Image (cartoon, rainbow, N blue to C red):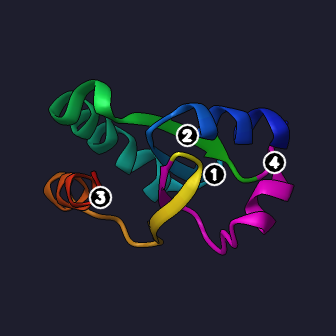
Amino acid sequence: MQEKFRELLNQEDLALVEFINANCEPCAMIEPTLQQVKNSIGKRLSIFIVNINDIPSVVKEFSISSAPMLVLFQRGEIVWKTPNILSKQEIIEKVLNSI
């Protein structure tokens, strides 16, 4: 699964990944915000949600220490990551500043 995840990231020019835990209430709360971000930015950004319990090797590789964790990848490389819950506007600004 780690290989498929890496392959997917490498295919995307810009990808925002939310690392979640299935029992995490804040994780579920941010998902509508991510959809709003996607609607605002459009095709330039792909958004993925990954359960940290499903691919622990990826969690270790990218030093994901908590959930939720937002990580922006550009061509498979980390541009920024934050454990903080950001507003729609904060996420959009961070993504647009990375393009």
Mark 2 or mark 3: name the one nearer the start of the chain: 2
The residue located at (69%, 66%) in the rendering is 62
Type of amino acid at the residue the image marks with label 3? Ser
Q: Who is closer to the viewer here, 21 or 89?
A: 89
Mark 2 vs mark 3: in front: 3
The residue located at (29%, 58%) in the rendering is 98
Type of amino acid at the residue the image marks with label 1? Asn
Q: Rounded to the nearest whole Å, what is the CA distance between mark 4 and mark 1?
A: 16 Å
Q: What are the residue bounds of the magenta stretch?
A: 53-74
Residue hosting label 2: 49
Residue hosting label 1: 23
Type of amino acid at the residue the image marks with label 2? Ile
Mark 4 or mark 1: name the one nearer the start of the chain: 1
Q: Which numbered circle lies on residue 99?
A: none
Q: Rounded to the nearest whole Å, what is the CA distance between mark 3 and mark 1?
A: 31 Å
> SS of the residue at dot 1?
loop
Mark 4 vs mark 1: in front: 4
Tell me if label 1 and label 2 are in contact, CB under 8 Å: no
Mark 3 vs mark 1: in front: 3
Mark 1 vs mark 2: in front: 2
Residue hosting label 4: 55
